[in-house]
Amino acid sequence: MDHLLGGIHQFHSQAVQREREFFQQLAEGQTPSALFISCSDSRVDPSVITQAGLGELFVLRNAGNIVPPYGASNGGESAAIEYAVSALGVKDVVVCGHSQCGAMKALLEPDSTAKLPLVRAWLSHAEATRRLIEENYPHQHGDELLEITVQEHALMQIENLQTHPCVAAKLQRQELTLHAWVYRLEKGEILAFSSEQEEFVPLAADVARAGIAVPETRKRRTNPA
């Protein structure tokens, strides 16, 4: 806690004092360009990964970067999505999973949450991912299976996003682009799903701008490696 308190003091005495006008502008309202949905894992910080400044990202974080289908949860996820898309008018939505994700490990090993009833209940919103992996990747194990799960899970959340009316409406008008990313902790790199290549590839400017061709999001799961 002392470290956090020291950081707060430094922030106020240095950053805020140096950029008074900027912070006054932030107080007047926000105009983020993207909704960034990521895991709550302490090793994953959307602003650090993207080097975004204050006010540039509207961030939604939870265990496992889960997007429940519309109407499936009474949590704040749907409200955050609706607000970002309809009220703030973000142009992009990123779902970013990450390597060595504890939530995905627990999804693959249900017994590990026997004493964590709330975690188990939350992970039930990722049941589609679990079933997909169980039925399509029976011969994969260990770290390779976990990597596949993280990637497939990110794609499944893109599909869940499309069940939200505000997202579906903006997609229909081509006013919104969806992106599935995976952050590799050990390398500090981002993989992005490429509709053209039908796989996750190292993020490049052209891939980042293109996003996901929505009708093609299921292709990766029809031909598992």
Image (cartoon, rainbow, N blue to C red):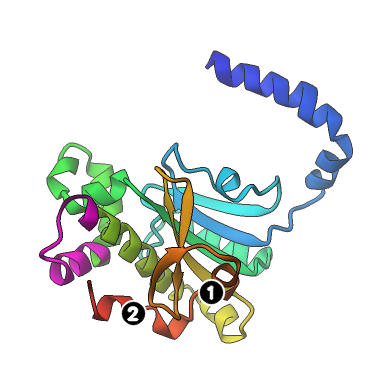
Residue 55 painted magenta? no
Where residue 41 sits, quadrant-wise, is top left
Which contiguous range is marked in magenta? Answer: 129-145
Mark 2 residue element: loop
Q: Can residue 70 be seen in this view?
A: no
The C terminus, quarter of image: bottom left
Q: In this view, does 155 lie above or below 116?
A: below
Q: Is residue 47 above or below residue 11?
A: below
Please name the predominant secondary structure of the magenta segment in the image.
helix
The x, y position of residue 176, in whole percent, is 60, 75
Residue at 12% from the left image edge and 45% from the top image edge:
111
Marks 2 and 1, the one that precedes in the sequence = 1
Q: Residues within 10 Å of mark 2 (few under 14, many from 20)?
A: some
Mark 1 residue element: helix
> Mark 2: which amino acid?
Arg
Q: Is residue 71 above or below residue 96?
A: below
Residue 140 painted magenta? yes
Where residue 118 sits, quadrant-wise, is top left
2 or 1: mark nearer the eye: 2
**Closer-to-camera residue (24/205):** 205
The x, y position of residue 184, in whole percent, is 41, 49
Residue at 66% from the left image edge and 49% from the top image edge:
52
Residue at 60% from the left image edge and 71% from the top image edge:
209
Where residue 138 sits, quadrant-wise, is bottom left
- Name the disc covering residue 152, or none: none
Q: Can residue 112 be seen in this view?
A: yes
- Name the disc covering residue 218, or none: 2
Q: Residue furthest right?
A: 21
The x, y position of residue 86, in whole percent, is 63, 69
**Closer-to-camera residue (63/222):** 222
| Residue identified by numbered label 1 | 167
168 horizontally vs 39: left or right? right
